[in-house]
Amino acid sequence: MEDIKVLIADDQELIRESLSIVLNMEEQLTVVGLAQDGEEAVRLCEKLVPDVVLMDINMPNMDGVSATKLIKDAWPHIRVIILTSYKDVDYVITALANGAEGYLLKSLHPRSLASSIRLVHSGGTLITK
């Protein structure tokens, strides 16, 4: 089975780099790109065509919800998981309405993140409580 190609979009460099290190240690997961905002995430989706995008919500230039809509409109096969610290139900509803397949909180365990990526890649949908 081919590795799942993951793009990470987050405005905090520490988060991007840390997630990249953790996910690249997982079997069947390869981080193919890091974006610092929604605009860069859209550009990298066109260039790299990832399988899954981990998308922060609150980023400069273009937020994660707007970027998710653009990505899903252009590449419906790319799966998007919102990864955020916001627990607000309005964010969940808006993200899912714009095509996201998952909504996870950054406080989850790294192993749970890896299994969540695999689940969404295989066609599942998930929302953290």
Image: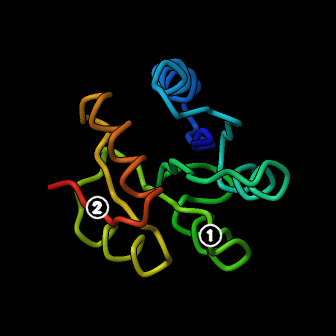
Left or right: 45 as drawn, with respect to 97: right
**How far apart in space, not on screen, are marks 2 and 1 (Cα)?**
17 Å
N-term-proximal mark, 2 vs 1: 1
Nearest the viewer among 39 and 103 is 103
Q: Residue at coordinates 74% horizontally, 75% vertically from top-left?
A: 74
> Disc count in the image?
2
Residue 48: horizontal and vertical position, in percent?
79, 48
Q: Is residue 49 visible?
A: yes
Q: Residue at coordinates 32% horizontally, 28% vertically from top-left?
A: 110
Q: Residues within 10 Å of mark 2 (few under 14, many from 20)?
A: some
Residue 4: quarter of image = top right
Q: Residue at coordinates 54% horizontally, 31% vertically from top-left?
A: 12
For residue 58, which numbered disc appears in the image? none
Residue 84: horizontal and vertical position, in percent?
37, 47
Say which residue label 2 marks: 126
Residue 10: quarter of image = top right
Give the secondary structure at mark 1. Answer: loop
Residue 82: horizontal and vertical position, in percent?
43, 55
Q: Residue at coordinates 36% horizontally, 53% vertically from top-left?
A: 119
Say which residue label 1 marks: 77
Where, quadrant-wise, is the N terminus in this rendering?
top right
